[in-house]
Amino acid sequence: MKKLIAGNWKMNGSAASNAALVQALLSGSSDWQCLVAVCVPAPYLAQVRGLVAGTGIDLGAQDVSQHESGAFTGEVSASMLQDCGARYAIVGHSERRQYHGETDAVVAAKAQRALASGITPIVCVGETLAEREAGRTEEVVKRQLAAVIHANGHCISEIVVAYEPVWAIGTGKTASPVQAQQVHAVLRAQLRAASAQADRVHILYGGSMNAANAVQLLSQADIDGGLVGGASLKAADFLSIIAAAQ
Ligand code: 13P
């Protein structure tokens, strides 16, 4: 399967810097052998849709409402994202679980809404440092993924999973390729138990992925791509990660 490299811009950017970043990404050949996406802040979906139209870059959002429509001030629905050209939506990022109290059930509902609108949810799972040190990594990621499998049953092969150890996000500490592969293998086995199509599911690694560590991480058997934060804001670094995935 082709690898998928997705940038998560988080709450960064401006109309001017978005245009400069996308132009820099597209300045070489964008005839990549892997799938590439950028997950941008909601107000810039329309702008970036125009910038990436007809290129090798797909558009993604960073969140989606668990509700379909109605009196939910400030929320953005899956059908709105679809209307704006989004192919992907990140759901259950640890920053949303941590700062916005998103539970496993909410994350599962968000994944369901995305799928119902033809958007591929990028479902994030991952343990905190305290959970890892307590030997609970497997239990935590399996619980997080189980909620999404339970709610999405036969559609489960349509999702993307991202393993993002919380202690590796924005810290410069990366899971070693062996540590990451161990967790990816657990997630793959869980997907296989749920679906005969599990081998189609991209399982991305996220957490301080950069130009220097991408080749080794991406060479692991069950690491099918990356969800890249900080390094996706620098064109040269993001292009190096894309090159590592070819
Ligand atoms: P960093 O690559 O900045 O560690 O962020 C990872 C992440 O959270 C991607 O969703």
Image: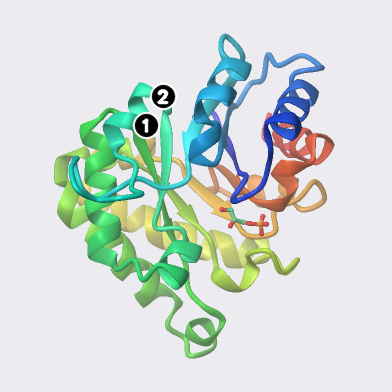
Q: Position of residue 234 (x, y in %)?
A: 79, 41
Q: What residue type is disc 2 on?
A: Cys
What residue would you read off at disc 2? 84
Q: Is residue 120 left or right of residue 7?
A: left
Q: Residue at x 19, y 40 (%)?
A: 69
Relative to 29, is 90 above or below?
below
Disc 1/disc 2 C-alpha distance (Å): 5 Å
Numbered marks: total: 2
Q: Position of residue 62 (x, y in %)?
A: 47, 45
Q: Which mark identifies residue 144?
A: none
Mark 2 and mark 1 in contact (Cβ < 8 Å)? yes
Viewer-nearest residue: 116 or 84: 84
Q: Position of residue 28 (x, y in %)?
A: 81, 16
Q: Residues within 10 Å of mark 2 (few under 14, many from 20)?
A: some
Q: Quadrant of residue 51?
A: top right
- From the image, which quarter does the C terminus lie in? top right
What residue would you read off at disc 1? 81
Viewer-nearest residue: 19 or 229: 19
Relative to 32, is 179 above or below?
below
Callout 1 secondary element? helix
Q: Residue at x 81, y 17 (%)?
A: 27
Q: Residue at x 28, y 28 (%)?
A: 118
Residue 197 appears anywhere in the view:
no
Residue 6 appears anywhere in the view:
yes
Q: Residue at x 50, y 64 (%)?
A: 95
Q: Residues within 10 Å of mark 1 (few under 14, many from 20)?
A: many
Whereabouts is ligand 1, in terms of quadrant?
bottom right
Q: Position of residue 52 (x, y in %)?
A: 60, 18
Viewer-nearest residue: 193 or 78: 78
